[in-house]
Amino acid sequence: MRLDAYLAQYWPETSRSTWAKYIKAGYVMVNGEVETSSKRLLDEDDEVTHQVPDAPNHDEQTLPIIYQDKNVIVINKPVGVLSHSKGAMNDEFTVADFFKRFTTYNVDTNRPGIIHRLDRDTSGVMIGALNDETAKLLQHQFSDRKAHKTYVAVVDGTLKQPEALIDLPIGRNPKAPSKFRVDPNGKSAKTVYRVLANNGKRSLVELNPQTGRTHQLRVHMAHVGTPIYGDKVYGKESDRLYLHAAKLEITIPEGERMLFVADVPPEFAAMEKA
């Protein structure tokens, strides 16, 4: 039997793919010696042991709460914080770690409470579900485009029109799979923008995505020649990505339509004036 399959069989609370990562990291030993290949074939007499480190304790870490009741929690996610872990062996504090203290939804996964996500470098409003019924209600609104999101960004340059709809499909870049680009064969993507201020060098803009494609706002703004300031993937790196999820309008249980707001960070106004 392969080593990863053996571990998954005898310690089934951990998935085979996770065991493969632990093996590669050097946490598994065969006959007292570290083995880093998941493909290692075991003989009947081989002794397998492991020393997987304890999960880090994030109990002392917190995030700013905008609103909370028995069904939802809404936070102002700081820049630099992951929405959720990308899998095993991620030791950093995430929004999901914070939501896990309050929710019963998806608690056995790496995404407890998570309904939607913001990129690590994006700050602003995130809503979490505290139970399964609420999760379904919120998920349907995101998928049916009934959850309305408003972002504020600082972009390089000046837009030709003060307000417009960018209707350009987006697809994955085959030459760089972690990046996206405007692609006529991609999925439909629509963004409405409105210029709030402009100093000739940079512009402060409001962005309303009508669809929810990965990196949509960043790809669209870069494509029209005004990349979001600090975008190290589609523009030029700075102290942060100047993209902030400022508002989320959504219906919560009991049928109440709510507007949640996270104040735009002061560095946005300072950067726009610089």
Image (tube, rainbow, N blue to C red):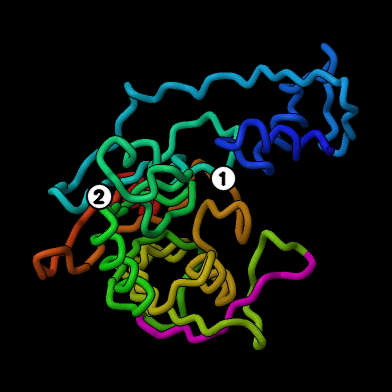
Element under disc 2: loop
Secondary structure of the residue carrying numbered label 1:
loop
User: Which of the two residues, 98 or 76, is positioned nearer the viewer here?
Assistant: 98
- Which quadrant would the N terminus be assigned to in this image? top right
Query: How many labels were placed on the picture?
Result: 2
Along the viewing direction, whichever of 30 and 258 lies nearer the viewer: 30
Give the image location of residue 127, x and y in percent: 28, 54
- Residue range corresponding to the magenta coloring: 163-175
Compared with 175, 58 (above or below) is: above
Q: Is residue 15 above or below residue 89?
A: below
Residue 167 colored in magenta in the image: yes
Q: Amino acid at mark 2?
A: Leu
Q: Amino acid at mark 1?
A: Lys
Question: Residue under circle 1?
Answer: 86
Tell me which residue sits at (17%, 64%) in the image.
252
- Report the front residue among 239 and 166: 166
Residue to which mark 2 is pinned:
130
> In the visual, does 56 lie left or right of 62?
right
